[in-house]
Image (spheres, grey):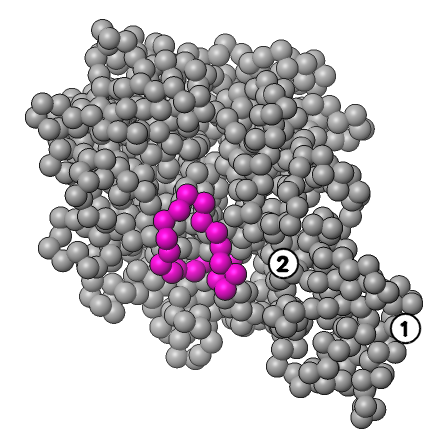
């Protein structure tokens, strides 16, 4: 027995040694021993000898010592500073030009930079705003194979749709392999409303499984009504499996991995003009640092345009006569409280009222619902339209139990993302939009990669680099390695590492799980930056908001190690707070500004500028715009009034005198004496108790209470309406959201943004 035990231990040790050797070989061979680029890479690929990278880390280490060497995380690579990257981007006269300049730091652009770096090419990337600042951070967060595309492929005998599904299924599998901490499996239920749909969806799902082959996550299966109701108590469904991911953090991980392999990737740098050589071919670009205004030029053998929805702006730099190929489409999503969905299962409804598909998924502790699909104008900061938000809520009401009231005030955040649907400029018929991606080469050799979706970003990047190697006559050292190359944070990650974080840093369980699932093995470095709470528990990790597990250390880490330069970078793309709860984010801004000011040396004037830009961004995330300008001091004062333990979803509680007043008014309007009043008299009842409400707002309240189709209501239903009114009255920042009329009735004008913790 002892021998068997020793053999097992030796076996485990062998596996660990083999894994370590393979990791060392990958980093050593792929990143450091490319002789042709050795000087270039030596400047970038510097590995920190210690996990802890500053004095701040050692403070935390002294407080909470690492207990055993077996629990210590592996050595972490330290990324170069943004200043170092800018110097490399500017280069020197005696240096050879870059092989490729990529414009656009979304998923596709960052993926292309990573792909080129794994092949040993000298590549640079510039992003006008921040990584994932556009569509890449505003997705549905679902990495799916495309069930609807498969349905179209069968019905229309469309081989193109079939290939799209096949590619998406493969890339979904790759997602889970290269970034296991940022992506996870999520069972998806498909509603079945009619008996004939059972065999239809069953055969379709099995065909989907067959198409996925070995790369299937889990086979689909039929759920009986009872089993379905156990998962979704109000639904009768059939089950599929997709994968969820954190899109913005995935984008940042791709960019950081590209940098670790030698790419020069810089955010907040825009291309203002393309440079052409004597032959009329693109050979460089004029760049500008949007933070400092500094300008310079860069020489390169070729340029790839990966700017997503803004593809046509770069194409017009190449040739002002180029026709637009992007047809922007708006996709609106809303965030609801977590009680709207099970924590480990989502829902897909392919039978909405107008034939569109709607997803209903748990994400980051809340519920995400969407999406719409409608033509829109191209803008940097798209705003969600109220009618699209209402459409999503109406669709949710269709498949939830009647006793669950979907209220507009439950919307914690809402945003709009622009899908860059494209027309292929090389096709003879340019009327149709392409759901897959296109690679187009202009007469001046500008390569444009456009279209596609998050799921297929890696395939798009590979195709773009393949084309660049051919067009620019480059000589790569390797073939594409991105199908197996793990992203930053994946090498030392395990599903149980959050337990070690709790044991070694005294973090809350929710915080430790969040750090592990957001940073992978980098969670050690983030936790080491955390400040003591001054409490018995948790020991470290001061929350940015009492409602979410984001901590102050993440802000410091984002600035020091993830190139966060602005307040919006932190609240939207390093943390996801702005996408989860616009109001909670607003309340957290003063604290985040304080931390970033310490890290970046912001002046009071700079703090105000960043606050103003952040609040403008939050208005695009569903935060109501107040009549008076918000200031840092005003937010601090209002936030201090609310208790940390206040339930943001609490229902209004009426005082005895209020109930007596409501009962008196209700009795006066109950002329028939049957305990009901006509809905036509509700506005009168509200006026009697001191509220003046516009008709459209009253309709919204009635819809939320599911009383919009009733001719009359009972007293309990009247109280439901008054509860919705009072919820808004007692919401935070009420002075900014209400018109106070100080007469004897305390009349208030109610805006449409009705809230019970939402916006």
| Mark 2 lies on residue | 753
Dot 2: what SS? loop
Q: Position of residue 595 (x, y in %)?
A: 64, 25
Q: Which sits in the foreground, 389 or 635?
A: 635
Image quarter for residue 303? top left
Q: For the N terminus, which image quadrant?
A: top right
Q: Which sits in the foreground, 366 or 478?
A: 366
| Vertical relation: 362 (above or below) 701 | above
Residue at x-position 14% and y-position 38%: 442
Residue at x-position 56% and y-position 31%: 610
Dot 1: what SS? helix
Q: Does the magenta segment cover residue 382?
A: yes
Gap in Å between the C-alphas at discs 2 and 1?
28 Å
Is 724 placed left or right of 614 in the picture? right
Q: Does the magenta segment cover residue 563?
A: no
- Rendered image: mark on residue 700: none
């Amino acid at each position: 027995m002892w021998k068997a035990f020793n053999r097992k231990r030796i076996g485990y040790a062998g596996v660990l040694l083999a894994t370590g050797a393979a990791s060392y070989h990958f980093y050593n061979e792929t990143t450091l021993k490319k002789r042709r680029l050795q000087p270039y890479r030596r400047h970038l690929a510097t590995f920190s000898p210690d996990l802890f990278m500053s004095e701040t880390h050692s403070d935390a280490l002294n407080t909470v010592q690492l207990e055993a060497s077996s629990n210590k995380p592996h050595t972490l690579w330290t990324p170069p500073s943004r200043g170092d990257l800018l110097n490399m981007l500017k280069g020197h006269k005696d240096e050879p030009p870059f092989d490729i300049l990529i414009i656009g730091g979304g998923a596709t652009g960052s993926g292309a930079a990573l792909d080129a770096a794994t092949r040993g090419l000298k590549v640079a990337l510039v992003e006008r705003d921040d990584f994932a600042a556009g569509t890449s951070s505003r997705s549905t967060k679902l990495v799916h194979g495309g069930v609807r595309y498969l349905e179209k492929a069968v019905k229309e005998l469309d081989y193109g749709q079939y290939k799209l599904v096949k590619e998406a299924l493969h890339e979904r599998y790759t997602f889970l392999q290269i970034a296991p901490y940022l992506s996870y499996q999520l069972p998806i239920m498909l509603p079945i409303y009619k008996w004939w749909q059972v065999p239809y969806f069953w055969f379709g799902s099995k065909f989907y499984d067959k198409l996925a082959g070995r790369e299937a996550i889990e086979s689909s299966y039929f759920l009986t009504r009872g089993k379905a109701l156990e998962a979704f108590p109000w639904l009768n469904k059939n089950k599929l499996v997709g994968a969820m991911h954190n899109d913005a953090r995935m984008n940042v991980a791709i960019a950081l991995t590209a940098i670790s392999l030698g790419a020069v990737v810089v955010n907040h740098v825009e291309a203002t003009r393309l440079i052409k050589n004597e032959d009329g071919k693109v050979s460089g670009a004029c760049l500008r640092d949007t933070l400092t205004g500094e300008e310079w030029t860069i020489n390169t053998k070729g340029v790839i345009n990966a700017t997503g929805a803004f593809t046509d702006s770069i194409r017009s730099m190449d040739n002002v006569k180029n026709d637009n190929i992007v047809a922007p489409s708006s996709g609106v999503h809303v965030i609801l409280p977590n009680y709207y969905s099970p924590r480990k299962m989502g829902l897909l409804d392919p039978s909405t009222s107008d034939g569109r598909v709607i997803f209903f998924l748990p994400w980051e502790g809340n519920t995400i619902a969407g999406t719409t699909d409608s033509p829109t104008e191209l803008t940097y900061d798209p705003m969600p339209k109220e009618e699209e938000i209402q459409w999503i809520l109406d669709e949710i009401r269709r498949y939830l139990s009647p006793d669950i009231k979907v209220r507009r005030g439950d919307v914690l955040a809402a945003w709009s993302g622009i899908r860059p649907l494209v027309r292929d400029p090389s096709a003879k018929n340019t009327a149709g939009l392409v759901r897959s991606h296109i690679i187009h080469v202009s007469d001046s050799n500008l390569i444009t990669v456009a279209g596609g979706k998050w799921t297929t970003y890696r395939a798009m990047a590979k195709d773009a680099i393949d084309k660049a190697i051919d067009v620019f006559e480059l000589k790569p050292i390797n073939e594409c390695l991105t199908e197996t190359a793990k992203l930053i944070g994946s090498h030392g990650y395990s599903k149980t590492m959050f337990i070690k974080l709790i044991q070694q840093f005294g973090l809350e369980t929710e915080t430790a799980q969040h750090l592990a699932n957001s940073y992978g093995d980098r969670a050690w470095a983030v936790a080491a930056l955390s400040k003591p709470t001054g409490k018995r528990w948790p020991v470290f990790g001061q929350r940015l908001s009492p409602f979410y597990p984001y901590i102050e250390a993440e802000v410091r880490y984002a600035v020091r190690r993830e190139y966060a330069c602005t307040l919006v970078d932190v609240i939207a793309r390093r943390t996801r707070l702005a996408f989860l709860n616009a109001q909670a984010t607003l309340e957290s801004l003063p604290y985040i500004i304080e931390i970033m000011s310490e890290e970046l040396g912001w002046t009071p004037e700079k703090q105000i500028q960043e606050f103003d830009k952040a609040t403008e961004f939050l208005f695009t995330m569903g935060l109501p715009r107040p009549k008076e300008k918000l200031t840092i001091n005003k937010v601090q004062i209002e936030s201090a009034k609310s208790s940390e333990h206040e339930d943001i979803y609490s229902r209004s509680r009426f005082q005895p005198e209020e109930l007596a007043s409501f009962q008196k008014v209700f009795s006066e309007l109950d002329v028939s004496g049957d305990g009901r009043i006509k809905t036509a008299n509700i506005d009168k009842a509200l006026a009697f108790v001191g509220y003046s409400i516009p008709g459209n707002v009253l309709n919204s309240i009635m819809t939320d209470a599911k009383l919009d189709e009733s001719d009359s209501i009972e007293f309990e239903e009247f109280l439901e309406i008054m509860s919705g009114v009072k919820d808004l009255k007692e919401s935070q920042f009420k002075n900014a959201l209400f018109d106070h009329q100080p007469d004897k009735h305390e009349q208030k004008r109610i805006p449409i943004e009705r809230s019970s913790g939402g916006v």
